[in-house]
Amino acid sequence: MIKVMRYFLVALAGLFYAQSASAQVSIEYGEYLSAECTACHLLSGKESNIPTIIDWDPESFIAVLTAYKNKELENKVMQNIATRLGDDEMASLAAYFATIKPKEENE
Ligand code: HEC
């Protein structure tokens, strides 16, 4: 719980910092951008052969995208996608996907 709170505060601080640096970072902008991602990454949180990206803490979400962008992670598809994302886009996507919680198994 404390860990969760910490992530939340880090995310919030990040969001405020980013917002003062530019008006581009927001959950709404992340939701808008997420249309490209959810063609592959299911919002339900179900894992197919593509990992789920909902309910992550924003810090690691940004770190992973940055690692794809820097080609430290090997997946070509994600490298191409991450290369096109700027800091504002990554922060917005991280903020948005962090708000999506897994659904119950039985739908
Ligand atoms: C064409 C399908 C596709 C699209 C579109 C796509 N991804 Fe991915 N993504 C993948 C696959 C496949 C992996 C697993 C790659 C690997 O094994 O390294 C992945 C991995 C990831 C991971 C790491 C997950 C983990 O558990 O390590 C993140 C974060 C991620 N994607 C975010 C995004 C975001 C944000 C977008 C939209 C901007 C996006 N992806 C769009 C297919 C896609």
Image: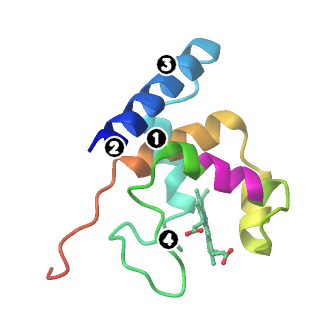
> Which quadrant is the C terminus positioned in?
bottom left
Choose the circle earlier in sequence order: 1 or 3. 3
Q: Amino acid at mark 2?
A: Val
- Disc 3 to disc 2, how far (Cα)? 18 Å
**Secondary structure of the residue carrying numbered label 1:** helix
User: Which residue lies at the image location 42% right of the left edge and 27% below the top edge?
Assistant: 12
Q: Which mark is residue 45?
A: none
Q: Amino acid at mark 3?
A: Phe
Left or right: residue 39 versus residue 21 is left
Q: Position of residue 74 (x, y in %)?
A: 80, 73
**Secondary structure of the residue carrying numbered label 2:** helix
Q: Position of residue 17 (x, y in %)?
A: 56, 18
Tell which of 8 and 3 is nearer to you.
Answer: 3
Q: Residue furthest bottom?
A: 49
Q: Which residue is mark 1?
A: 95
Q: Which mark is residue 41?
A: 4
Locate ligand 1 by image quadrant: bottom right
Q: Which residue is mark 2?
A: 4
**Secondary structure of the residue carrying numbered label 3:** helix
Q: Amino acid at mark 1?
A: Ala
Choose the circle earlier in sequence order: 3 or 2. 2
Q: Position of residue 40 (x, y in %)?
A: 53, 74
**Within 8 Å: ligand 1 and the Cβ of disc 4?**
yes
Q: Is residue 65 above or below residue 95?
A: below
Q: Are marks 2 and 1 in contact (CB under 8 Å)?
A: no
Choose the circle earlier in sequence order: 2 or 1. 2
Q: Are marks 3 and 2 in contact (CB under 8 Å)?
A: no
Number of numbered discs overlaid on the protein picture: 4
- Disc 1 to disc 3, how far (Cα)? 12 Å
Q: Which region of the structure is painted magenta?
A: 62-67
Mark 4 or mark 2: which is in front?
2
